[in-house]
């Protein structure tokens, strides 16, 4: 029999090594009670032997049981009985258990027939929940059941089950939780003597008053407790929910031992120092350079301002760990040090907790699968997606390795900050390993609408992992709302809090605007905080770099090379998402329609090539090369090249000099999570007391934050051309005012503020 296994939290407890079946209700029972009791029980059940079965027996419809099945904390059941006994399926693949389910379906007169017959009873209000082979209603608890209603249900050859005073279920005659459980046990040739059932409401009565042992958990419905008060073989627990199940299993002798809880072992810093901070990021805060058998370090070549900001949290001797991959020859290389100091001088108590991955691991996990399966979905290009189930298995494994490293180094109650989509599954694994941790996740890319995200075959598992976080941050409110919709599409989720997006964000003024944002959800009894935190930039660093004499000299050289021509600057990675071909088409149209601009305007196009091995970008690169060649061939002159094309990563100092000189920054991605280039351009103009025009795609996340940008639609070539022309002909007064507004936003909401506010949100301050 197949069973999906998940690594369990360490525990000294074991189930008795005998054939054993636990058949349990979900809401109020297995999923109820204290969190520490749930964690302890789930750990035991995940570690059960193949002879020990777990059966979920729920009043929910199967559709609303699915989120529980995909919750990484909840042990996977061997079988699921849903719809108050009217559905029975295998827990692994949800295949029907026949002939049991066929027999139930044959006894059901049909939903339409039942609703038609009961339409004359206005006191019944149908429940709007997923349901199969049953009809569920609300009834005012103060009302008695109408005898005519009972006769009508009987005439349909159905039974009526009332629970919690106000719920009514019409079921096929003879079908109940208890009857379907008996049929399943007969189908599996299992002895009732090895069965323990658990429940908390009257619709659990049929499986609790049977011939096997049963547990009524604490806080159960009073009517259920009264019916079973003196029944032999029924244990009435004091503890609610999962705690009651544990109490009953101990009293019934199913637990082999009971020892005091012991703390989870970890190698983190001294807990007396306070809550430790653990960063989980795919890359180290330094580059490792291999020279034969020797590994040296150097500062990252990327101008990414996030790494220095995250490092800043460990300044002043704050203890912590940074979990990231390290390229190795194997996953268990000889002499590999999993923990090494990051920088003894500046961050004396920060340790790199390295995950040994081979280059093949990284190529498959990051460069291929993440970019082929997730990147097109994240940016709403489903036509480019490629799914491989074996690649998904590898992705799961790598995420598990990251989670295990974080669990091993985090101190008690530590904050663990997980970064970006390639580590989506870390929170689920981590919560399972270390329930005591406070987990925050920041999504550095866009997040698509539910009808796009749910194309991913494993979206339930991904969302099941993410909702184990205490707090999840996105760049802008639209992505928050998209995520909340995905969670709701996966299963029941209650909105706990919402807030207005104005005046911090544009609401109705661009494609990604939204007026109200969800800030907290309740999912499976857990509170998940949500928020919008656009990443900022380091304005102070940009000011320091541009004030250097060599920067000013480079700016003079660029201006001299332009010879008075206006400069339109475009800087982006080589990526179809950035819309490079659409931009070139619009620029070509501008030159066609406005010959007066020939020799007067230059497009400086800087394209950072994709990392080696990312084959998905090869075709885009070739098409961009062809388009640049065509434009320069059509319009170029001996003394003028319309498109100056840099197909390489320029040093950040060089990029800043171009920012400071450019008249227009033309930032027009088809989709973008945020876009820091736009903010860097604004900062360069602001610190040099110059003014320019930012033409920004309204599909870039930054568009809802940067009041003062000239928004454009990159899917509309004519609109792109018109907006660029407007930027080139804009009055100096308007350019100055737009730059002033934009610089105020970028200066106040910088990278340091982003980090502080996100960490406070994770901590619950």
Image (cartoon, grey):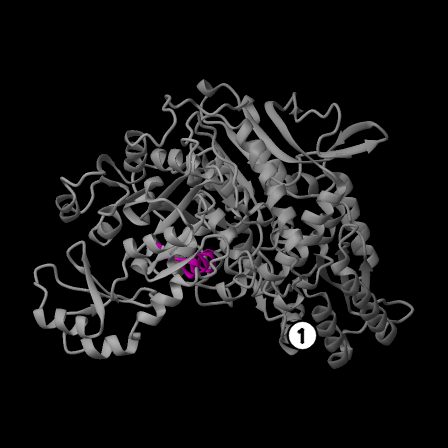
Q: At 35% from the left edge and 69% from the top edge, which residue is drawn?
A: 105
Residue 628 vertical position relative to residue 352 in the rendered view, above or below: below
Q: Nearer the viewer, residue 94 or 389?
A: 94
Q: Position of residue 209 (x, y in %)?
A: 22, 47
Left-right relation of 300 to 644:
left
Res 2 seen here: yes
Q: Position of residue 698 (x, y in %)?
A: 56, 66
Q: Residue furthest right?
A: 638
Q: Give the answer, above or below, for where 747 lies relative to 517.
A: above
Can you say which quadrant of the picture contains the C terminus? Answer: top left
Residue in the image at 57% along x and 47% along y: 420
> Which of 499 and 134 lies nearest the eye of the viewer?
134
* Residue 184 left/right relative to 419: left
Query: Which range is magenta?
Result: 480-496
SS label for mark 1? helix
Residue at point 41%, 45% (across, down): 54
Residue 11 shown in magenta: no
Relative height, residue 298 to residue 515 (above, below): above
In percent of width and height, residue 131 lies at 33, 65
Residue placed farthest to the bottom in the image? 593
The quadrant where residue 740 appears: bottom right
Give 203 or 668, whichever is nearer the viewer. Answer: 203
Q: Is residue 495 visible?
A: no
- Mark 1 surroundings within 10 Å by alpha-carbon count, few (fewer than 14), some (14 through 19), many (20 or more): many
Majority secondary structure of magenta residues: helix
Residue at the location (55% across, 47% down)? 424
Where, by quadrant of the figure, is residue 619 drawn?
A: bottom right
Q: Position of residue 192 (x, y in %)?
A: 33, 44
Residue indicated by mark 1: 721
Q: Is residue 486 magenta?
A: yes
- Of residue 757 and residue 380, the one placed in the foreground of this image is 380
């Amino acid at each position: 029999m197949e069973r999906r296994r998940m690594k369990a939290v360490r525990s000294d407890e074991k189930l008795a090594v005998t054939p054993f079946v636990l058949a349990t209700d979900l809401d109020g029972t297995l999923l109820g009670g204290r969190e520490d009791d749930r964690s302890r029980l789930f750990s035991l059940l995940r570690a059960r032997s193949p002879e020990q079965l777990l059966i979920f027996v729920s009043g929910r419809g199967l559709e609303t049981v699915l989120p529980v099945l995909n919750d990484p904390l909840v042990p996977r059941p061997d079988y699921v009985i849903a719809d108050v006994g009217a559905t029975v399926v295998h827990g692994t693949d949800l295949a029907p258990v026949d002939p049991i389910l066929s027999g139930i379906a044959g006894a059901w007169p049909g939903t339409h027939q039942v609703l038609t017959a009961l339409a004359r009873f206005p006191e019944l209000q149908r429940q709007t929940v997923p349901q199969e082979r049953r009809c569920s209603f609300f009834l005012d608890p103060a009302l008695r059941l109408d005898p005519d209603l009972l006769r009508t249900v009987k005439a349909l050859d159905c039974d009526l089950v009332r629970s919690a005073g106000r719920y009514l279920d019409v079921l096929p005659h003879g079908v109940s939780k208890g009857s379907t459980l008996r049929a399943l046990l007969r189908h599996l040739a299992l002895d009732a003597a090895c069965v323990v059932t658990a429940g908390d409401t009257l619709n659990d009565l049929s499986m609790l008053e049977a011939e096997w042992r049963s547990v009524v958990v604490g806080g159960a419905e009073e009517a259920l407790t009264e019916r079973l008060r003196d029944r032999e073989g029924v244990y009435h627990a004091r503890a609610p929910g999962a705690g009651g199940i544990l109490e009953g299993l101990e009293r019934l002798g199913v637990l082999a031992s009971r020892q005091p809880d012991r703390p989870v072992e970890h190698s983190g810093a001294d807990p007396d120092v306070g809550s430790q901070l653990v960063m989980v990021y795919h890359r180290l805060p330094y580059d490792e350079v291999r020279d034969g058998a020797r590994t040296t370090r150097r500062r990252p070549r990327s101008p990414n301002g996030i790494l220095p900001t995250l490092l800043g949290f460990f300044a002043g001797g704050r203890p912590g760990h940074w979990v990231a991959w390290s390229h190795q020859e194997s996953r268990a290389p000889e002499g590999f040090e999993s923990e090494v100091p990051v920088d003894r001088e500046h961050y004396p108590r920060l340790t790199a907790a390295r995950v040994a991955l081979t280059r093949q691991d990284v190529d498959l996990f990051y460069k291929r699968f993440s970019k082929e399966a997730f990147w097109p979905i994240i940016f709403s290009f489903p036509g480019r997606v490629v799914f491989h189930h074996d690649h998904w298995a590898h992705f799961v494994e790598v995420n598990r390795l990251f989670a295990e490293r974080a669990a091993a180094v985090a101190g008690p109650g530590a904050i663990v900050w997980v970064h970006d989509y390639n580590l989506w599954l870390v929170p689920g694994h981590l919560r399972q390993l270390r329930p005591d941790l406070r987990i925050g996740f920041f999504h550095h890319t866009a997040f698509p609408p539910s009808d796009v995200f749910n194309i991913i075959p494993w979206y339930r598992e991904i969302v099941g992992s993410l909702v184990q976080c205490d707090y999840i941050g996105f760049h802008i409110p639209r992505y928050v709302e998209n995520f909340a919709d995905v969670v709701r599409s996966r299963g029941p989720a209650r909105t706990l809090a919402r807030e207005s997006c104005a005046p911090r964000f544009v609401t109705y003024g661009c494609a990604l605007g939204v007026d109200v944002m969800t800030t907290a959800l309740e999912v499976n009894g857990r509170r998940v905080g949500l928020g919008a935190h656009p990443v900022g930039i380091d304005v102070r660093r940009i000011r320091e770099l541009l004030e250097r004499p060599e920067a000013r000299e480079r700016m003079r050289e660029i201006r001299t090379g332009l010879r008075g021509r206006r400069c339109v600057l475009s800087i982006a990675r080589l990526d179809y998402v950035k819309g490079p071909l659409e931009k070139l088409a619009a620029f070509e149209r501008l030159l066609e329609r406005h010959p007066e601009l020939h020799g007067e305007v230059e497009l400086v196009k800087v394209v950072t090539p994709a990392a080696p091995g990312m084959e998905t970008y090869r075709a885009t690169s070739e098409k961009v090369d062809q388009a640049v060649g065509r434009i320069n061939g059509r319009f170029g002159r001996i003394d003028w090249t319309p498109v100056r094309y840099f197909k390489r990563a320029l040093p950040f100092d060089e990029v800043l000099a171009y920012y400071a000189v450019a008249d227009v920054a033309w930032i027009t991605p088809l989709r973008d999570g945020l876009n820091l280039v736009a903010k860097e351009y604004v900062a360069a103009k602001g610190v040099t007391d110059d003014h320019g025009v930012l033409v920004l795609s309204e599909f870039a996340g930054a568009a809802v934050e940067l009041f003062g940008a000239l928004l454009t639609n990159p899917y509309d070539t004519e609109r792109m051309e018109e907006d660029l022309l407007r930027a080139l002909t804009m009055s100096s007064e308007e350019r100055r005012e737009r730059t002033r507004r934009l610089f105020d936003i970028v200066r106040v909401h910088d990278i340091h503020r982003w980090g502080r506010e996100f960490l406070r949100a994770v901590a619950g301050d």
